[in-house]
């Protein structure tokens, strides 16, 4: 569980003095606690075996409430480490920037021309190619993507195998293997 300043956008998880979970509550205007479910779980084998196979199941809405109703022991672990909800494009790019120390990080298998400029926490995936004169600021470049010569990208996400043509300028775009779409930053 993670403590947030404003829990209204999340489901909250009230616990007792021993961190035993009392209930899982969905988003509400006036949360009873600012501790939220951060989505990382440890189950014993019996709980895993009780989750139905072949059926989409929400552990937050079905499994946990069922365990609590059956008076099974469900505990929360209160974590104070860095955490960020990456539910918006803007937050995803912030998380990428936050985890990178310096201007960029690149896989050892990436091919980056010496004249390319990478800044703002850009992340380059395995076997990606960044050609001569390309400029990337705060971008996430997935495995096997190619940024051609002279392209200028800012806050762009390139899916695996995506190709950005020479001298193209993009800002706030998602580029898949077959098309490009602008991203709405919230």
Image (cartoon, rainbow, N blue to C red):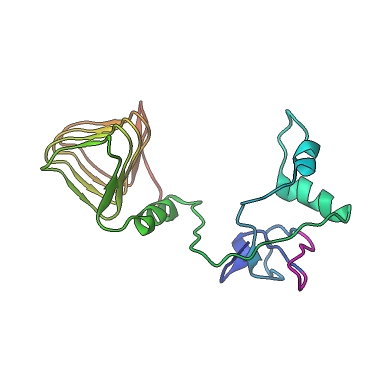
Q: Is residue 184 magenta?
A: no
Give the magenta range. 16-23
Name the residue rendered at 81%, 57% in the picture. 73
Does residue 43 appear left or right of residue 181 in this picture? right
How many numbered marks does the figure carry?
Answer: 0
The C terminus appears in which quarter of the rendering?
Answer: bottom left
Q: Quadrant of residue 68?
A: bottom right
Residue 53's spot in the image, x, y percent?
A: 75, 30
Residue 37's spot in the image, x, y percent?
A: 64, 58
Q: Quadrant of residue 33?
A: bottom right
Task: Identify the residue at the far top of this view.
Answer: 178
- 65 or 183, which is in the foreground? 65
- In the image, residue 2 sits, relative to residue 116, either above or below, namely below
Residue 49's spot in the image, x, y percent?
A: 78, 36
Name the residue rendered at 30%, 40% in the picture. 107
Magenta stretch, main secondary structure class:
loop
Task: Identify the residue at the far front of this view.
Answer: 45
Does residue 66 appear left or right of residue 102 in this picture? right
Does residue 40 appear left or right of residue 91 in this picture? right
- 39 or 90, which is in the foreground? 39
Name the residue rendered at 80%, 42% in the picture. 46
- In the image, residue 17 sits, relative to residue 130, either above or below, namely below
Name the residue rendered at 61%, 66% in the picture. 7
The N terminus appears in which quarter of the rendering?
Answer: bottom right
Task: Identify the residue at the far right of this view.
Answer: 70
Residue 171's spot in the image, x, y percent?
A: 28, 46
């Amino acid at each position: 569980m993670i403590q947030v300043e404003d829990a209204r956008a999340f489901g909250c998880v009230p616990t007792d003095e021993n961190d035993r979970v009392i209930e899982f509550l969905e988003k509400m205007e006036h949360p009873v606690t600012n501790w939220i479910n951060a989505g990382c779980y440890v189950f014993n084998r019996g709980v895993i075996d009780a989750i139905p196979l072949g059926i989409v199941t929400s552990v937050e809405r079905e499994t946990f409430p069922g365990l609590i109703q059956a008076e099974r022991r469900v505990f929360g672990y209160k974590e104070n480490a860095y955490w960020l909800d990456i539910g918006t494009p803007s937050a995803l790019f912030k998380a990428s920037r936050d985890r990178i120390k310096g201007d960029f990080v690149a896989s050892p298998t990436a091919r980056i021309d010496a004249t390319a400029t990478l800044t703002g926490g850009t992340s380059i995936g395995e076997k990606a190619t960044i050609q001569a004169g390309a400029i990337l600021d705060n971008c996430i470049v997935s495995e096997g993507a190619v940024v051609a010569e002279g392209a200028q990208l800012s806050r762009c996400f390139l899916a695996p195998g995506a190709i950005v043509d020479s001298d193209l300028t993009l800002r706030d775009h998602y580029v898949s293997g077959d098309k490009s779409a602008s991203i709405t930053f919230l």
